Image (cartoon, coloured by chain):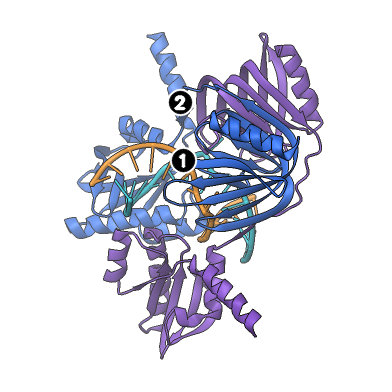
Chain colours: A purple, B blue, C orange, D cyan
Amino acid sequence: MDAQILSERLSTDLGERKTTVLTCSCSIEYWGRSRSVIGCGDRIILFKPDSTVIVHSPRGFKPVNWMSSPTDTSADLEDGRTVVFSQRTVKPYEEMKITVDKVIEYTSLPGLRDEEKIDVTHTERDMRDYLEKHPREVHPDFRLKTVEHHITPGFIDLYGKIGDRYVVVELKAVKAGLPAVLQLKRYRDWLREKLRQPIHAILMAPGIAKNPHTLLKKEGMEFKKFNVHKLEIKKEKNTLEKWMN
Amino acid sequence: MDAQILSERLSTDLGERKTTVLTCSCSIEYWGRSRSVIGCGDRIILFKPDSTVIVHSPRGFKPVNWMSSPTDTSADLEDGRTVVFSQRTVKPYEEMKITVDKVIEYTSLPGLRDEEKIDVTHTERDMRDYLEKHPREVHPDFRLKTVEHHITPGFIDLYGKIGDRYVVVELKAVKAGLPAVLQLKRYRDWLREKLRQPIHAILMAPGIAKNPHTLLKKEGMEFKKFNVHKLEIKKEKNTLEKWMN
DNA sequence: CGTGCCAGGTGCCTT
DNA sequence: AAGGCACTTGGCACG
């Protein structure tokens, strides 16, 4: 495809907010939060109706370059080449310039519709909801008092008591690292200071890294394994029980 | 496009590791680290030669679903519909199932080549390299001893002295938050314990959030503004000076 | 709008 | 493989 034709078609199609896929050989420059340059190579450029621009190389998950909506994106002819210039209209201000060397494929589609929202489960939120209903899985004697209990340094996932001892529970849906342990320690220390009594701290996660675990133990806190995948089994059990009643 | 034709073309093209873009109305299920479901909507599906699969809805930056290489991805005909099944062959094990309702557009391209590596600058690494050469911008009297100085709790970005006082410098290319302050505090406290003497701690970043700044000051540590964008100016100045000599 | 924090985070590099 | 950490992190919810 001729550079002038491409420039005109892009201008028209972007103006009409069509979903456009341009496969081409191109080089790209980016200025903004950081700065990047990449030389000529074959890439797939996706222009979305909401003005998002995403550039994919033939390898890997992550786009090689991108511009997040809202952007002003336009195509021009410069020295016989099509140049796509995209500019973010709000903070953070960013710019991307794509210089097209050779068009491989061009497709533009109007009126794509997707009203659906994705439903993601097996997340930390689900873990919290589940343990709110099954506090015994935290500890046989755990009595839950508050979920998302707000204190000065942040939010405690689960707050309650075992016997007469207050308990702080921090939840992680993925393997816990240092930040999780530090966060729990901060809550524990703050409460201990506030209530002037020992506080029991429990970190629940499918796993914990080695150094964080060392620190956890040294600080007298507890790790309890909880895999979010078991939620599936529980749910099915629950459904089965319901069906049997 | 007929479902059977699509299944056959996809099987062929994926088998030949062609870069393929399928625009279609589809529903998607995902099982793996989490679980997700999304009903029927128009989406752009990108199949890369390295077996990466990325599904984009017409809105937003983030893919609605994806599978990271390496995957086994294949297309089949089920109840008169094309079903794409993608499975990760290594940990973490994951699966994605796309049920195609209606094909809107199909493009498959062989032999896309991109040998270029992106060059990203104005990053924390550049900040460190720059300050290594210009330690006076940390403090007029700062004498740098070690870059990426390894101690038990982690790596100190810049380690040196001001007068006879040891100095720990933590760098952030973006606005500093609580984790940055806690990290610096950990290094400072560890060194103070180890060397049994007061340690000066400096956090250099383009900005710092309010609460973290309060904690920083309370702990007797210092914040010094450093914007990575100034590197550009410095570099240009440097080039200019070189050119003038 | 800034702040905090989860995410199917991803990617890179070191042990 | 696991750990640690930056990232143009993105996204959301809350003050």
Q: Is residue A204 above or below residue B243?
A: below
- What secondary structure is found at the residue carrying circle 1? loop
| Neighbourhood count class around disc 1 (C-alpha, 10 Å): few under 14, some 14–19, many 20 upward | some
Residue type indicated by callout 1:
Pro
Taking B13 as reference, is C13 left or right? left
Q: Nearer the viewer, mark 1 or mark 2?
A: 1
Instruction: Tell me residue B182's x, y (percent).
Output: 38, 57
For residue A9, which quarter of the picture?
Answer: top right
Camera-side residue: D1 or C8? Answer: D1
Say above or below: B101 vs B213: above
Task: Please name the residue shown 81% across and 38% down the image.
Answer: A111
Q: Residue B163, position in %: x, y? A: 22, 43
Quarter of the image holding residue C3? bottom right
Q: Residue at x 55, y 35 (%)?
A: A63
- Chain to which the residue tagged by mark 1 belongs: B
Q: Amino acid at mark 2?
A: Lys
Residue indicated by mark 1: B70
Q: Regarding mark 2 in the picture, which secondary structure is present there? A: loop
In the picture shown, does residue B171 fall above or below B185?
A: above
Q: Residue at x 42, y 60 (%)?
A: B215
